[in-house]
Amino acid sequence: MVKDQVKGNRSALETAAEAIRELCEPVSPPKRTLDYQNYFCARNLDNKEVVERNEARRAAFYEAVVEYARAFSVIWDELEAARHSPREAASIEKEVSYFQDLGEELKRAAGGSVAQDTAY
């Protein structure tokens, strides 16, 4: 039973990682904060219409970040049992943190004026 739980938790983590990476695929290289801001908010942040039009995109991103962080926190104590090396675990932790920080940057860039932006 424990093996099944670890396997399920590992699967949830992989699914969450894949989901957020898929959402970020259309972001233009080199995929710096500004590139994410352009895609998830707007190139011109003064254009509130475009910022609002991208609300669903941001909301999907925020939800994906929460799911990834949740999946990581659930499996944290089981990373070795889930066959993640310490190096892989550190890499996953770094990526989760990066996306959380990025979500906060997008929230600030969007002005926090959209309902989903303030819920993140």
Image (cartoon, rainbow, N blue to C red):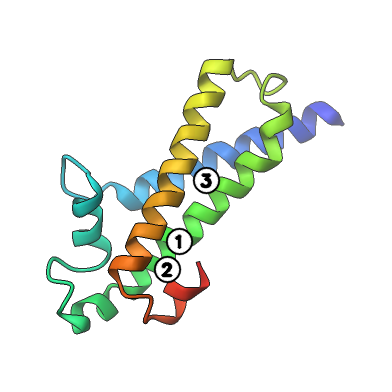
Query: How far from the left and from the top, in percent, is residue 59?
Result: 42, 68
Q: Quadrant of residue 85?
A: top right
Q: Residue at x 18, y 72 (%)?
A: 45
State how far apart marks 1 and 3 are (Cα): 12 Å
Q: Quadrant of the N terminus?
A: top right
Q: Residue at x 66, y 25 (%)?
A: 79
Mark identifier at residue 16: 3
Q: Which residue is mark 1?
A: 62
Q: Residue at x 68, y 19 (%)?
A: 80
Q: Which residue is mark 2?
A: 59
Describe the element under mark 2 as helix, strand or loop.
Answer: helix
Instruction: Work out whether mark 3 precedes mark 2 in sequence or the reverse, and give the earlier one.
Output: 3
- Taking depth in this image into account, of 95 and 11 the one nearest to the observer is 95
Q: Residue at x 42, y 47 (%)?
A: 99
**Image check: 32 left or right of 56?**
left
Label pair 2/1, CB-CB below 8 angstroms? yes
Identified by mark 1, the residue type is: Tyr
Label pair 1/3, CB-CB below 8 angstroms? no
Query: How far from the left and from the top, in percent, is residue 4?
Result: 78, 31
How many neighbours does mark 2 have within 10 angstroms: few (below 14), some (14-19), or many (20 or more)? many
State how far apart marks 3 and 2 are (Cα): 15 Å
Mark identifier at residue 84: none
